[in-house]
Amino acid sequence: MTGTRYDGTRHGMAVRVLRAAGRPATAWLNGGGVTREVAGAPEGSGLADFDWRVSLADVGQGGPFSVFPGVDRVITLVDGAGMALTVAGTEHVLAQPYRPFAFPGDADTGCRLLGGPVVDFNVMTRRGRATAEVAVADRGRESAVEVPPGAAVLLVCLDGGAELDAAGLRLGRFDAVLLDSPGRDLLRVDGVAAVVTLRPAG
């Protein structure tokens, strides 16, 4: 995980800045799109051994999703007309942006694009190791962000801009910050931001 670490002095929070410009794109094996990892834990882990992993994907064509045994997923449409996911035989239409949809990563899942390529935001947690709560902060909103003891909060700007008060950090589109020490801060959003609270399981 790349980025620059700042120590917030007003709230004593450790802040890791993860700029969108520094993310490499990884092509899917089936050629249907590319994924850019935003953050993951443990640091340096791969697809087989992460506790949690957050990424953005450019989806160019429909097809089957990769199966991740023992993994729970939350997917959020960011750009495009949307997609229909068939999870274990049941279709779910994701046509509205910024509405998180949770499903088991080990279920047989297929994707049908509704009208061309899409960008989606993905949160994956390994069952028994970590859990995730995905919330969306909308335009013109100020909200308190609290990091509970033992947890981490990842903020990802999905549209427009956002600002984290303690460190005076301005986030552009797809920039992120990881808060990984207990504390409280104020998030100002003039676009749309995902707020992902990650906790150890159990």
Image (tube, grey):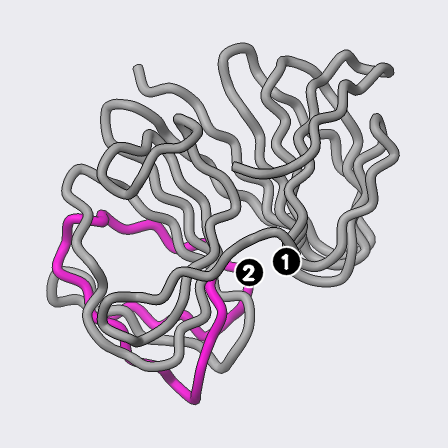
Q: Is residue 96 magenta?
A: yes
| Image marks 1 and 2: residues in contact by CB distance under 8 Å | yes
Q: Amino acid at mark 1?
A: Leu
Q: Is residue 153 above or below residue 54?
A: above
The residue identified by callout 2 is 98
In the displayed structure, 97 sits above or below 137; it is below
Local packing at callout 2 (Cα closer than 10 Å; few below 14, some 14-19, many 20+) is many
Q: Relative to residue 1, is residue 44 drawn left or right?
A: left
Q: Which stretch did the figure color magenta?
A: 91-120
Place of residue 74 in the rendered image (x, y in percent of width and height, measured from the top left): 38, 49
Amino acid found under the numbered disc labelled 2: Tyr
Q: Is residue 188 above or below residue 118?
A: above
Residue sitting nearer the eye, 29 or 169: 29
Which residue was labeled with disc 1? 158
Tell me residue 57's x, y (percent): 44, 63
Of residue 89 and residue 152, the one placed in the foreground of this image is 152
x and y, in percent, of residue 56 in the image: 48, 58
User: Which of marks 2 and 1 precedes in the sequence?
Assistant: 2
Q: Name the residue: 44% across, 77% down.
A: 82
Label placed on residue 97: none
Residue 125 drawn above or below residue 161: above
For residue 5: magenta?
no
Q: Residue at x 29, y 75 (%)?
A: 31
